[in-house]
Image (spheres, rainbow, N blue to C red):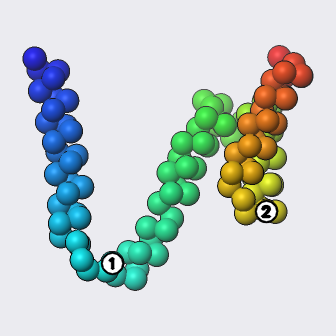
């Protein structure tokens, strides 16, 4: 019962926090500095998810002993830099990762 209560209270708390923000800001526009800052939330969250997965527990030391994830991430980063096309970056990065894993060059 305690676990279910924690789930219900956590969900209710999350819902109320989101609803209160919508209720407070409802029909008003955001201040310009906040709106500019919110433009960086998506890329920051994406980086926070991807970098630990790419570098793993070895961190920056992985640069001297690369694995397929790091090489695929570098190729995907290059594609993004050149084309600014996120779906293309995701597709090329995954195909590159699969090809590198399939090749067996990295143990």
- Residue 30 numbered mark, or none: 1
Q: Residues within 10 Å of mark 1 (few under 14, many from 20)?
A: few
The residue at 23%/64% (across/down) is 22
Work out whether mark 1 precedes mark 2 in sequence or the reverse, and give the earlier one: 1
Disc 1 and disc 2 in contact, CB within 8 angstroms: no
Number of numbered tags placed on the structure image: 2
Query: Left or right of 54: which side holds 75?
Result: right
Q: In the picture, which quadrant includes the N terminus? A: top left
Residue 71 vs residue 26, the one in the foreground: 26
In percent of width and height, residue 78 lies at 80, 55
In percent of width and height, residue 68 lies at 79, 31
The residue at 73%/50% (across/down) is 89
Could one spot residue 64 in this view of the protein? no
Element under disc 2: helix
Residue 105 vs residue 98, the one in the foreground: 98
In percent of width and height, residue 85 lies at 72, 59
Residue 103 vs residue 71, the one in the foreground: 103
In percent of width and height, residue 12 lies at 16, 42
Q: Label 1 vs label 2: CA separation?
A: 31 Å
Residue 27 vs residue 99, the one in the foreground: 27
């Amino acid at each position: 019962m305690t676990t279910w209560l924690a789930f219900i209270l956590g969900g209710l708390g999350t819902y109320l926090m989101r609803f209160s923000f919508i209720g407070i800001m409802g029909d008003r526009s955001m201040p310009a500095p906040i709106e500019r800052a919110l433009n960086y939330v998506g890329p920051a969250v994406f980086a926070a998810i991807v970098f630990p997965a790419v570098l793993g527990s070895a961190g920056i030391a992985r640069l001297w002993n690369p694995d397929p994830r790091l090489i695929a991430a570098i190729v995907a980063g290059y594609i993004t830099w050149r084309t600014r096309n996120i779906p293309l970056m995701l597709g090329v990065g995954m195909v590159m990762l699969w090809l590198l894993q399939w090749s067996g060059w990295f143990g």
